Amino acid sequence: MLAVVFNGVGKGISLEEVHVPQVESLDGVLIRVRECGICGSDLAILEGRHPSKPPVILGHELSGEVVQVGAGVTSVSAGDHVVVDPNMSCGTCQNCRLGRRNMCSNMAEFGITRDGAFAELAVSPERFVYKIDPRLSWREGALVEPLSCVVHGLAKSRIKPDETAVVYGAGPMGLLWVSMLKRVGVRKIIAVDLAEKRRAAAEGLGADVTIDPANDEPVARVERETEGLGADVAVEMIGRAETVENAVRSVGSGGRVVIMGVARKDAISRVGPFDLMLKEVEIFGSNANSAGFIPAIRLIEAGAIPVDEIVSHELTIAEAQKGFDLCRSGQGMKVMLRPV
Ligand SMILES: [Zn+2]
Ligand SMILES: [Zn+2]
């Protein structure tokens, strides 16, 4: 079968003929991939900012159809429409046992450290496979994984409808944030992005204010837009030291800062401890999802996410390079790849 293989930092990706994966264990589920989104972390892997284990088939945001199951599988069967949680935690390390499976010490990451879904077929252990309503489109299914991460961050932010929020970065993840903040009924949603297309998309999804940081100093503008108080919640979806600093400076008293962007490992942000103390600001990371899959599936099934506003391209895996380029340039929003 054909698959998009990452060969190592500096070597990029290539379309290769590889062996068809097999259901080798009792709990194995073989899935025919129908659609799989390109994620910002795929770009980070190519650039060496995110660890992986090349050569590996990339792709971790999939939807597909079960083809075959191992003898011990009971929750899904051939023909079911499914999605896969790519964070394949071990279940036995201290973090897993303490309920922090997204920080598993022995994490196998589907499509990152083990073969993923930019391919015709993929295999996953049963416990990471979730059934979805067969009436959903494949692109809706493929948005479950990124949405599960936003669901996780949203819960951590403890945002309430009377509050205000600013989202730094209106790429696909930032747009999912805007959609969810709108759904929650947040009083004022502000989105910051350099790309006009992305600001327009954020407005389409319910952002009340968008800021172009090239023309408008975002922290001062957020202050003006929030009656001088600062935002209640700031979300950093870009992964840059400076935008983290801006996010921290954007919140007011009792503010919460959610860091979800993938920064370079050696990036350092400067924060003012006096202000943090005075304003009792909370800053926290949000890493993938721990129990976000079921909520994300329910939300997608309820039509909570305007999928067509977030998905900009559907290409075949043979066009993977083009898809990656569209993501990198900011020309594309969520770009989906399908095997044929
Ligand atoms: Zn991802
Ligand atoms: Zn573990």
Image (cartoon, rainbow, N blue to C red):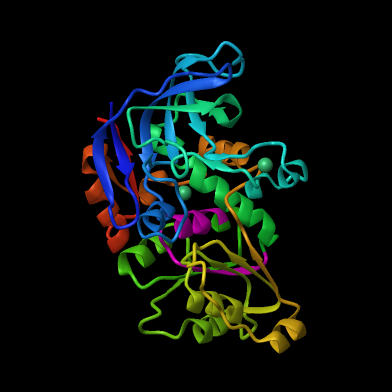
Q: Is residue 233 above or below residue 65?
A: below
Task: Based on the picture, tell me whether residue 173 belongs to the magenta stretch.
Answer: yes
Which residue: 24% across, 49% down? Answer: 321
User: In this rendering, would 101 be left or right of 270?
Assistant: right
Q: Nearer the viewer, residue 122 or 53?
A: 53
Quadrant (top left/top right/bottom left/bottom right) for the N terminus: top left
Q: Residue furthest top?
A: 71
Q: Is residue 225 above or below residue 155?
A: below
User: In this rendering, would 65 be left or right of 321?
Assistant: right
Note whether residue 160 is visible.
Answer: no
Q: Nearer the viewer, residue 306 or 317?
A: 317
Residue 7 image position (x, y, % from top left): 32, 46
Could you say which quadrant of the image residue 276 lies in? Answer: bottom right
Which residue: 57% across, 32% down? Answer: 128
Q: Nearer the viewer, residue 220 or 20?
A: 20
Note whether residue 22 is visible.
Answer: yes
Residue 222 image position (x, y, % from top left): 53, 80
Q: Is residue 187 above or below residue 225?
A: above
Task: Based on the picture, tell me whether residue 274 belongs to the magenta stretch.
Answer: no
Could you say which quadrant of the image residue 283 lies in? Answer: bottom right
Residue 214 image position (x, y, % from top left): 36, 82
Residue stretch in magenta: 162-180
Quadrant (top left/top right/bottom left/bottom right) for the C terminus: top left
Which residue: 49% across, 32% down? Answer: 83
Q: Is residue 10 above or below residue 80?
A: below
Name the quadrant where ligand 2 sits: top right
Which residue: 49% across, 79% down? Answer: 242
Residue 227 image position (x, y, % from top left): 61, 83
